[in-house]
Image: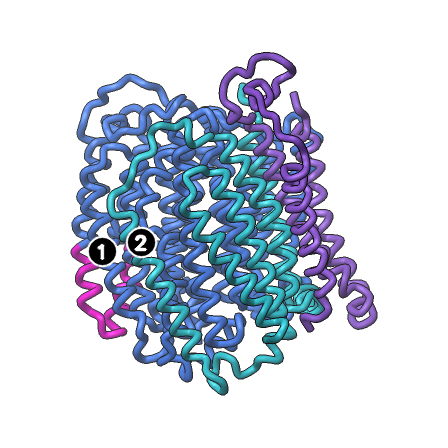
Amino acid sequence: MLYSIEEFYSILPFIILSTGILISVLIEMYSSKSEKILPWFSIIIFSAAGFYSLLTVNSMSVIMQGMLQTGGIPNIFHFVFNFGAAITCLLSVDYIKKYGAFFGEYYILIQISVLGMMCMAGAKDLFMIFIGLEVMSVSFYALAGMNRKRLNANEASLKYFLLGAFATGFVVYGIALIYGAAHSTSIDVITASFPAMSGNVIFLAGVLLFLIGFSFKIAAFPFHMWVPDVYQGSATTIAGLFSTGGKAAAFSAIIASLAPLFAGSVHVFMPYLAVISVLSMLFGSIVAISQNNIKRMLAYSSIAHAGYMIIGLAAGNHAGIAGIVFYLTAYTFMNLGAFGIVSLIEGNGETNLDLNSYAGLSEKNPMLALLLSVFMFALAGLPPFAGFFGKYYVFISAVKGNITWLAIVGVISSAISVYFYIRIVVLMYFRDSQSGFTIKNSSAGMLAVIISFMLVILLGIIPGSVINLISSFLN
Amino acid sequence: MSLELFLFLVFAAVAAVSGILMITRSEVVMAALFLILNLASLAGLYLLLNAQFIAVVQVIVYAGAIMVLFLFVIMLLRPEHEKIVTKISGIRTFAFIIAALVFVQLAYVILKSHPGSALNSDVTASVNAGTVESIGTELYTNYILPFEAAGFLLLAATIGAVVLAKRKFE
Amino acid sequence: MIEQYIPVFLVIAFAIVFAVLVVFSSKLLGPQRPTPEKLSTYESGMKPVGSTHERVSVKYYLVAMLFIIFDLEVIFVYPWAVKFRILYNEIGTSVFVSMLIFLIVLELGYLYVYKKGGFKWE
């Protein structure tokens, strides 16, 4: 339990969120208008937890009998999760009426999933990572199938559940082998015994299985099969949360558990990480070109982005970890913005999702066209937006880690990916509209997109100070 | 032959035979019933390893609750009525490869753990770790946070189950 | 250590022996005069119709899922109950509070199911 007031302050974001969940369940039980109250209540909870984490980012501590680490990188992740979820809730206010899942449990499950993510980011023990992963995943499986009447939502939920459970199996098997070799699940103990264990086959097999399990969750290439179908089948806002919060949480768990192992001069997992990184980048970028559905296109783009981020892990230095954290922060807001605009343009019953719906958008709604262009430029990694600096820091870390060839593959893959991002911009500005649908006005959704836009711009203006802040926690 | 060895042989034989019978049954309900027998005999093996808590969990959760769910799914779907069961080619070869890998891995671990090696250097500690008392002590002193998080995991499962199975759509 | 469990094993052995005995003794001792009517499935005296393998309603499945969830909850309470007195003397009320929080979270879920009609059998 809590032994001091300092511990209480450190764990406050968790307390805020879990109290929020319990109050939300009570609201859902006793209010007939819960679906109207809960989005705003969730946003308040997420903002409170997110801003509190950001404010206390400098007070580092290890609490709860060495289970949880707060301050530093975990708090940056807490901010990203909470703010990403707040933007998702804001987008959902009008969207879920269109989608047909207009009920309060939707927001409760988002809150619980964020609690799981926070447990993963701050974990100091493999148990915490496992429990956090499950809390997040179970909420995600239910969220993917929210609209029971849609066949592809059912498919998405089932596919996500089966492959997700499979991935969890890998993680648990990995943890079991690590425990068998290192006699502890505490990350500090495992890190300390790593030099002695580096030749132990059981230990290395455990870490490899652990990494394979998380490769599913970050949607890296050979383990990506679920991504396009799940993103297409589930609600657009939820797909945005899967691709940002889910990916960031999986990366945060890898960083929390394995970053100290990777900090050595040579690390044995470099070949595995380099291979899945190259495959994800090229596969995602090339297959995205042939997609006609914007959600599927963003899904393949999300696979490619996972590949870029893994470069930072393969580099295995502090610059790489800092690069991933920055990249994830930038990616969360630009991808949520892109998914947000898709959700605003989407009509009743999953219409207007093919790329042709975006033709002539600049005349129909110049504001949305401009914002979507910015998000596309940012995702493509063009300067001066946040996405460029994310890629820049990750590639630089690869050069520092003596794997320049990986950075070069990354640059080539980015060049390929520019094609499909810019294609949307070209469609919006240089083609005439073919279908005469009208875009329903949603001021809450618009606000969410504008907030993501401002964060993308902000991260593009002050990347240096953000990366310095992140790097200062690593030394 | 000591009592422990005798019981080990009985439980191991029951587990192995029921496992083989389970995968060779064509009647799904029969296969599920053999799985229960298999899980129950595993509980006996856990008890012999002095992992009493795991043994209890094995009986209550796996042989009890999970198998109830299995049987409900079988009765819900009635697989023998579905005529679309297709044989995936090569599935047996794949299964044999996976089984061989697991077997090799287990054999490696068991052969490597000769007395004095790192794997079983603290036998008494790991024997005591399996008792209900030591699990209680660990769970409610050091592992409180994962324990509370598990509460939220179960809450998410409850809400998800009710939303997906019960919620009315307008 | 294992000697403590001899009574448990005796009960299991007795259960197996008793079950086998009861099933087979009626076969051995009772008179066997089968007719086709006697061997057919009993269905309130009517002619049996269709397969015995009817599909059950999906409602059972929700009940089974909720049963598992609350079964797992019980699993957590079991080591707590075994260890409560000793831990209470060592570290005080926090051991009580931690279980209280856990139970509040889960009982709220229970109340939620009740309120949403999860236990109703329409």
**Palette colour of chain A:** blue
For the residue pair C47 and B95, the one nearer the viewer reads as: C47
User: Which corner quadrant of the image does residue C19 belong to?
Assistant: top right
Q: Mark 2 lies on which chain?
A: A
Q: Mark 1 points at which residue?
A: A279
- Residue at 39% from the left image edge and 34% from the top image edge: A155
Amino acid type, label 1 = Leu
Residue at (72% x, 49% y) in the render: C103
Residue A122 visible in rendering:
no
Q: In this view, does A363 lie above or below A295?
A: above
Which kind of residue does numbered mark 2 sit on? Ala
- N-term-proximal mark, 2 vs 1: 2
User: Which corner quadrant holds the C terminus of chain A?
Assistant: bottom left
Give me the residue at 51% from left, 30% from top: B76
Q: Which quadrant would residue A407 be assigned to in this image?
A: bottom left
Q: Give the range drawn in magenta.
A: A387-412
Chain letter for mark 1: A
Which chain is purple in the picture? C
Cα–Cα span, label 2 and label 1: 8 Å
Number of on-image labels? 2
Q: Is residue A408 magenta?
A: yes
The residue where tag 2 is placed is A220
Give how far across and how far down residue C2 sits, in percent: 67, 70
Q: Which of A232 and A17 is in front in this view?
A: A232
- The N terminus of chain A - image quarter: bottom right
Q: Is residue A401 magenta?
A: yes
* The color chain B is rendered in: cyan
